[in-house]
Amino acid sequence: MRYTITVLVQNHYGVLSKVSGLIARRGFNIESLAVGVTENPDISRMTIVVDCDENGVEQVEKQLNKLIPTIKVRVLKEGAYIARELTMVKVSCNAKQRAEMMNLADIMHARIIDVTATSLTLELTDTTARTETFISLLRPFGIKELVRTGISAIELGVNTTKK
Amino acid sequence: MTGAQIVLECLKKEGVSVVFGYPGATIAPFYDALVCDGTIKHVLVRQEQNAGHAASGYSRASGEVGVCCTTSGPGATNLITALATAYMDSIPMVALTGQVRSDLLGRDVFQEADITGACEPFTKHSYLATDTQELPTIIKEAFHIAATGRPGPVLIDLPQDTLEREFKGEFVYPDSVDIIGYKPRTAGHSLQIKRAIEAISKAECPVICAGGGVVSAKSRRELLKFAEKLDIPVVSTLMGVGMMPTEHPLYMGMLGTHGIYSANYAIHHADLVILCGARVGDRAMSKPDQIAKKATIIHIDIDPAEIGKNMKADIPIVGDIRNVLKNLIEKTDELKHEAWVNDLRKRKADHTPVFTSIKGQVDPRNFMRTLSEIVSRHSKAILVADVGENQIWSANNFAFRGGRFLTSGGLGTMGYSLGAAMGAKIAKPARQVIAVCGDGSFQMMMCELATLKQHDVAVKVVIMENNRLGMVRELQDKLYGGRYSGVMLDGSPDFVKLVQAYGIPAEAVGDDDEVEGAIERMLKSSEPYVLVCKVAADIPSRQED
């Protein structure tokens, strides 16, 4: 099963490699990892998606907690958080196809961020599921390049993950 | 003051009196500060790995944080095995490594190695100290992290310019640390303790499994009191050997693949297992699920990640074992489990084999029994076992009566014993410190004889010489049709002559009848001493085969 884990860490040199190295060497697969600084510049937040069983995610959580630069670890509960990822796709697209592509972008709430005579670059911020749909719709046009950030997640309601 | 002097002052503030190490160019500023100041003793080992084992042995024997230092590059990489050994056995130590100047980092200059990166899996924490001003905070934190919670090794990588630069302002060593994400829990959860007490009161066949955590938590006395008050038999893992007196009526021995029958019987027939600082390693319990199916599991550990890692726990108690046991002792009434204990005691007695002496050979198991008899007349000895058959012979046949057993239980590092024994002897000079090794492990570390001689460290070394890597040979007998591959140690030297070349007294024994006198002579010696035992080739590691 896929679990989304949010981790607050000290914004120090080498922390990202400590976290990713730990998860890898304990035998878990990272599906995605996104990291960025928080409202407090000394603290970064990572959103990590791992694919494992329930015991596995418990171990990941406990092992992450053991790292000295780790401040807080939380496994987010299904349905209690919002997750988004940013995707940028460069597709083959000639003048004839452009209208169809714009229509598709409109339906999916994607933005066109670059255009040439033979290509079009789109940007989408959405859930992983909708992102997958978007990509599958673009595939017939010929995807030249695909860039995904991996998801960032935040809890629903007034709850926050803080120290 | 320079950064190097700051490091030295910080070590003094931490009460460090000895550093095990090997110098080199990048760590040279620190070595200069050491010699100019003169208060901290430096023990020059002959290979960096042994500096790490010595610091670890020092930690284990003294209960303080041992310190080792090496230079950058190969000096630091040689240390990795010792750090990994200490990490697996949760030994607190601080390793200082030199590093190339910080403006050269990442350029693959002479003797550069990314040691903080390389040691990531083997250290509790590490620092790359690029700012001289941060040294006091880093060192304070390093010692705190090494010694608290689940102990472990901490690495501080010191670029040469950090050591050479002048420290600005007045040197003040911090009184306390404040690490936002590091607050180990020491008191057990009261609700879980209540559940544990209830489970204990209901159990008919309870057993305590004592692991290395009992040693780290310095809770030997509490363990004994807890077991005696509630009349619960105790088995131990390799790391827990020596915590219960071997001949105590409640002690059923070491469990696991290389343990003894009564201990394994106890754990497999118990209806309640109280794990105390044991991580349920595969060598201790190869099928933890089978045990958990029959018994309620109470797991006490300072490290929450150990609970549920290898075995499902019904009652998890995260906390310092000493605290938790004290709490349990206070809150429980005396119990009796006469039938269960007597059954186990009978099984232990029935399965204590007598090993018949064979003329012209030393039986290593009889040797260990005789050694423990004689040693206990002298002092509470510290026995350091290496890895291989010698480790199992030691664990199963040496009777502990208050002494200590040090060994590389987790990583199983051959060549551990001499360095560790050296550190232990320096920590406890009044105690007999005996290193037991095989002729394989001895040859991995025999360069350290010079260190013993140079620093007059009176470690007693027993070499079980059988001219083969016995443990692997056993494996090849069992699983590979007796096809011996790479296990013969032909070409080994005459160990007595070799040791004597260092100016260290040595003798060899080749018969059980000669053992007692030889041990007496060895223990009487005020110098380091090596006793070579000519043991038979086919003596198994297990007590009963």
Image (cartoon, rainbow, N blue to C red):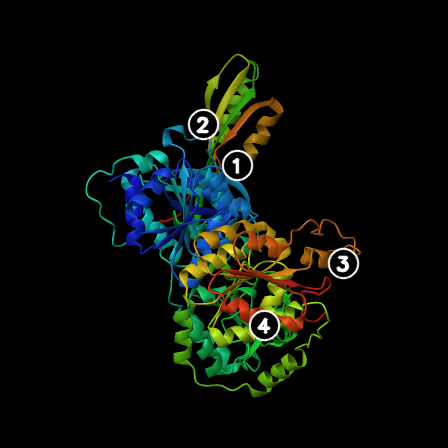
Mark 2 chain: B
Q: Residue at x 60, y 27 (%)?
A: A139
Of badges 1 and 3, the one in the foreground is 3
* Amino acid found under the numbered disc labelled 2: Arg
Quadrant in which residue B253 is drawn: bottom right
The circle drawn on residue B477 is: 3
Q: Which residue is mark 1?
A: A130
The mark found on residue B517 in the picture is 4
Q: Earlier in the sequence, mark 3 or mark 4?
A: 3
Q: Is residue B283 or residue B82 the one in the foreground? A: B82
Horizontal relation, residue B261 to residue A120: left or right: right
Depth check, mark 3 against mark 4: the one in front is: 4
Residue topped by disc 2: B107
> Which element type, helix, strand or loop, lies under badge 4?
helix
Estimate the x, y position of residue B162 in percent, counting from the top left: 32, 36
Chain bearing mark 4 = B
